[in-house]
Image (cartoon, rainbow, N blue to C red):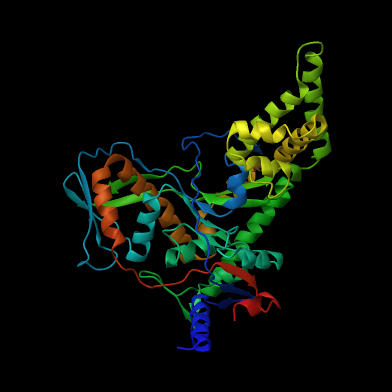
Amino acid sequence: MGRVAFSLILTLLVSFQVLSQNRGSFSFASPPAMVIKQRVDFKPDVNLPDEEMLPSVFSQSVVSSVGGISFGATAKKETGLDIQSLSIGYNASRPDGERMELTINSKPVFFRIYDWMLKPIAGFSDSEFNSCFTYFGQLQDKKLEETILRNGGHVLNYHPALQNTLLGWRLSDMDILILYDFTSDLPRINNKVILGAGETSPDVQANNYGAYEFSSHINKIEKKLGYSFQSYIITDFSRDVSFSIARDSLFISGFPYYYCWKYQNSLKGYDINKVAAEVKKGYETTIKEHAGEAFDVREFFIDSLIAIAGRYEKGYTLFRAGTFNDLLAVSEESGRRDFLRRYTTESLGSMAIEVTAQMAAQTPVHLKSFSDQMSEDPEMIRACNPAVWDATVMTMRLSAFFRYLKHNFPAQWETFAVTLQKIPIQPEVTTPTVLFDKGHPVLTGLFK
């Protein structure tokens, strides 16, 4: 085969993998992307005070990289439910939706779940990572990623178990439900809606009305409170997910929560210069207190920067270049000290003040009142797109129940999870990884 022919075939293969689709005034494409491998940890039984704004339970690195959907709860038994024995299996000979076979206390317990949701939810639940989807993703091709972001596009990433699944696509629509009008419909290929078993074609007109009602509700909250959110994470944080058995069926309760947040520096009256001045004053006070002692100011700032780097690595992703970023690239503390000793005392002090002030400025704040009011009516949210909401609720509830099984019946769970890895699911889809304005002069040409 000649070089030209081989090159043409390779081009065609790459073009085939990059699925392009239009939805309303926006376009999607599917160049190879990274997957989300992030674990979001928080206390499941937290009781928050009824205050307007609270310290965020999610770090800056989480809100800046997830900005989407994260479910990590473990379901609890309802009071009075005593489980002496449990088994769970998969029976491919049964109709789709009835193939998960659950037995509790030697009695069959029914729970309808279709394969297109069952397999990815089980894979997600079995993973150490609990972030489902992010609107702030990364591509494998960094140059292409930079071009997309520079031209106003967005990169979409999925949990490994949700990538290239219809459930993953539903969750991506859930995350951007209030951001884009096209989410009142479902994705289509050749103008045919893509449905999973148990779903029905959307009533777009009714969904548009539902979206209008929810948008009006959000506007009322903004007017009442006098502020809005910067972004949100759809999560099970602060939600009770519990299960019970009635009429020989399993019932799982709980609804997702819009965890709304904004950075400190976007709060009214925030002044980063005042914050930096306070940090500087604190350093000056410490130095004055040790005046006349054998106190090494340069080593003091080195110690401070080592400590700041430790706090930064636990919860921040602010810097992509610069001296502090170079410091973080050094792994060992001894190496970091050697690195910092290359700089003057004045430079070290300036770095400590600047980095501390920037970290404080971009520390997220939980807008609890806004979040509570936005999440208070699940049926209102569902009316925006029932298929998308129902898939999201199922992911939250069933993953929490599966974590209960994993923790309390590990042997049964492991056998079940391994079995599900082998089953095929329909429909087969390629999840979009890039969203951009339809007809964009630069990006449209990349994905023709």
- Quarter in which the N terminus is drawn: bottom left
Q: Position of residue 170 (x, y in %)?
A: 48, 65
Residue at horizontal 71%, vertical 37%?
A: 360
- Quarter in which the C terminus is drawn: bottom right
Residue 247 visible at all:
no
Q: Position of residue 95 (x, y in %)?
A: 24, 68
Q: Position of residue 209 (x, y in %)?
A: 59, 68
User: Closer to the camera, 351 or 6?
Assistant: 6
Q: Position of residue 333 (x, y in %)?
A: 60, 32
User: Closer to the camera, 343 or 410?
Assistant: 343
Q: Kindly indicate the quadrant of the structure image that contains residue 57.
A: top right
Q: How many marks?
A: 0
Image height of 333 relative to 437, above or below? above
Image height of 122 relative to 433, above or below? above
Is 234 left, or right, of 98 in this rendering? right
Residue at horizontal 68%, vertical 26%?
A: 303
User: Closer to the camera, 74 or 228?
Assistant: 74
Residue 58 visible at all:
yes
Is 50 left, or right, of 133 in this rendering? right
Image height of 251 relative to 342, above or below? below
Is 6 left, or right, of 292 in this rendering? left
Q: Residue reaching furthest left?
A: 106
Residue at horizontal 50%, vertical 34%?
A: 46
Image height of 65 relative to 422, above or below? above
Is 174 left, or right, of 368 in this rendering? left
